[in-house]
Amino acid sequence: MSENRVLSVTDLKKHFFTQQGVVKAIDGINFSVSAGETLGLVGESGSGKSTVAYTLVGMYKPTEGKCIYRDQDIGIESRYRSKELKRDIQIVFQDPGTSLNPRRTVRQILELPIKIHGTYKDSRKRLEKVKELLSLVHLPEDYLHKYPKMIGGGEKQMISIARALATDPSLVLLDEPTSALDVSTQAKIIKMLIKFQKEFRLTYLFITHDLSLMSYVATRVAIMYLGKICEIAPKDKFFRDQLHPYTKMLLSAIPVISEEEEELKPKKIQSRGEIPSAIDIPKGCGFYSRCFKRMDICSQEDPEMVEIRDGHSVRCHLYSQ
């Protein structure tokens, strides 16, 4: 493993067994994240991207595959996670309204991870740390005594981010951290996250359905569809020379405000149908029924991921012939 690699995921699967059948939320994905970078994991609702975050943070146990954080196995071979590992990998959830305990004050919420990990034994030092965290996210000290129901959605998410930073992590999983917020608050939080990444040398896995957002925050972009990654590339290559028909369809639908941005987009591609059920995944390529470039082989064989050029890989029969 590269000394610079923080996370390596190999053939990861997460299946849920229900009365209706097996839900293949993650169905064999491979990616890595290097220190200091932001890997953007993008997909429609139901693509399995949030399940990736929940599996990596330990909320779900993988069905198959390997997840290596630095030199530690955090996948199916891992019996338990050390306190150090739990400190190093933190997550910010999409909806802060459900991820913050309504019965605890902001001070109690931010102080809890500091207590658990024993960063400061002295209560006065813990309080100073909590005040420092509030200051980082631009919230006044009088928020210490407020409950989540007393503050707005954007402020709740800032508290969630502060809580994630409380343990001085290395890897932060961002599960659509701005999707439930208004545009001005989104911009503020994105700017804040970029600043924190540089200041604290953080590594991000940024999960979102907003592809346009990735042009501002990502180092590399991975597109996920029906439990699988269909394309992954460095950001600059991705937005200038995308390969997969699904990626082209997503990019063609992004609203832009300048002629220069419009020229970079693929020609308008009409979206067909809905993403199939993860319980009843069709034979062959999962995107076959929606693809405007489909071939006969696409309905019969699931394509393999192939690297077209340095760092740019795609899973499509158009490039494996």
Image (cartoon, rainbow, N blue to C red):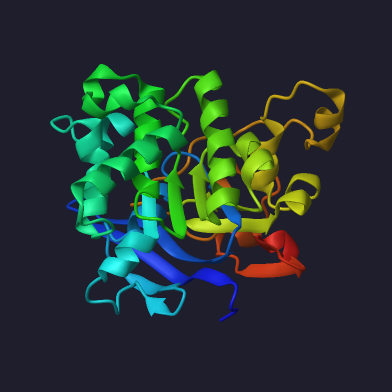
Q: Please provide percent x and percent y for residue 205.
A: 50, 53
Q: Please provide percent x and percent y for residue 288.
A: 58, 50
Q: Please provide percent x and percent y for residue 170.
A: 46, 60
- Camera-side residue of 18 and 144: 144
Residue drawn where x is 37% and y is 47% of the image:
164
189 up-or-down from 15: above or below? above
- Camera-side residue of 69 and 21: 69
- Tell me where residue 195 sits by quadrant: top right
- Camera-side residue of 270 and 210: 210
46 up-or-down from 135: above or below? below
- Tell me where residue 157 sits by quadrant: top left
Quadrant holding the C terminus: bottom right
Horizontally, residue 58 falls left or right of residue 234, namely left
Residue drawn where x is 48% and y is 36% of the image:
274
Horizontally, residue 196 falls left or right of residue 45, namely right
5 up-or-down from 284: above or below? below
Residue drawn where x is 61% and y is 33% of the image:
271
Residue drawn where x is 35% and y is 49% of the image:
166
- Camera-side residue of 52 and 143: 143
Residue 301 visible to the viewer: no
246 up-or-down from 188: above or below? below
Quadrant holding the N terminus: bottom right
